[in-house]
Every structure is written in structure tokens, then in C-alpha cells.
Image (cartoon, rainbow, N blue to C red):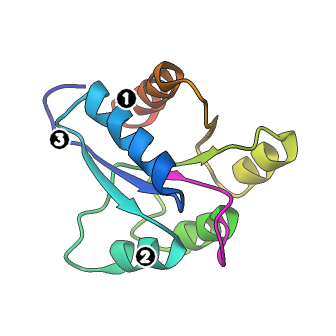
Amino acid sequence: MHGSKRIIFLIDDDPDDQEIFQQAVQKIDPKIRLVQAFGADEALAKMTCSQSELPDIIFLDINMPRISGLQLLDLIKQMPQCQHIPVVMYSTSSRPEDIRRSTERGAAAYITKHCSFDLLCKDIVLVLNKFVLN
């Protein structure tokens, strides 16, 4: 992971989940730049701003107010500048229908939020190795 600077975009409305994710990314590689948004509106604003660098990968929570993660996934996949970016659904739900609906809508992967910090780090590394460092 060390060497080139990577950008991860986390979209999650839960401050605690954002904090844990940020700590995991720092532990994995302090050179990774983590950009965060607390919901769909903030995420869309950051992704459409011409000053913004596009991320290498997006981690997206499913359960968010107003615009759900699945609805936001649809919007991201319609944006020409973002269609190539892998979107990983990151949710407390492990329901098979949520996983199926996510992949049908174009999610590259689906990981479940764990109570274990080490498992979160392991999942993030697996996803980065598969989609960003290949």
C-alpha cells in the first residue's frame, strides 16, 4: 500500500462509524487520503465540484436519511466522471437482499460493519488490494 497516494471517499451519516473507519485507514497506511461526507447531498456536492480530485474508491453506507445509499449508488453510476470508480457498500445489514440489490445496481463489493477493529482493517485491505492496487 505504501508509495503512491490513494484517495478513499467514505459516505456515512454516523460520526462514530466515520471515526472508526478513519482510524482503520490511518493504521493501514497513513499516506491514504480519506475524504468523508455525512450524507448524499454532501457527497454529491464534493463529487461534482470541479476542484475535487476523484477518489480511487468509494465506501458507501446503505442506511442514510433522505437519500439512501442504494439511491446514491444509482446517482453515482449515472455520473460519467464517476462510473469507473468502484463503490463498496459498507453497512450494518448483512441481509442477502441488501447485498443482492447492491450488486445488481453496480456495487463492486459489499462489506458488513463489524464490532472488531481488526476485522474492519482486514476488510478494507482486501477491498483495496482487489480494486485499487490491481
Answer above or below: position of 124 versus 17.
above
Q: Nearer the viewer, residue 115 or 12?
A: 115
Local packing at callout 1 (Cα closer than 10 Å; few below 14, some 14-19, many 20+) is: few
Answer above or below: position of 117 versus 88.
above
Dominant secondary-structure state across the stretch colored magenta: loop
Residue type at mark 2: give it: Glu
Q: In the rendered view, does 130 fall on the left or right side of 48?
A: right
**x, y percentage for residue 84?**
45, 56
Of labels 1 and 2, the one closer to you: 2
**Residue position marked by numbered label 1 in the rendering:** 134
**Residue position marked by numbered label 3 in the rendering:** 5
Give the position of the C terminus as an image quadrant. top left
Q: In the rendered view, does 34 fall on the left or right side of 100?
A: left
**x, y percentage for residue 20?**
43, 39
SS for dot 1: loop
Q: CA distance from mark 1 to mark 3?
A: 15 Å
Give the position of the N terminus as an image quadrant. top left
* Label 3 or label 2, whichever comes before in sequence order: 3
Answer above or below: position of 51 versus 5.
below
Q: Which residues are magenta?
A: 59-68
Answer above or below: position of 29 versus 45.
above
Residue that lies at the very extreme toward the left in this rendered image: 3
Q: In the rendered view, does 44 fall on the left or right side of 23?
A: right
Residue type at mark 1: give it: Asn
Residue for point 85% across, 39% down: 96
**Residue position marked by numbered label 2 in the rendering:** 42
Local packing at callout 3 (Cα closer than 10 Å; few below 14, some 14-19, many 20+) is: few
Q: In the rendered view, does 26 fall on the left or right side of 105?
A: left
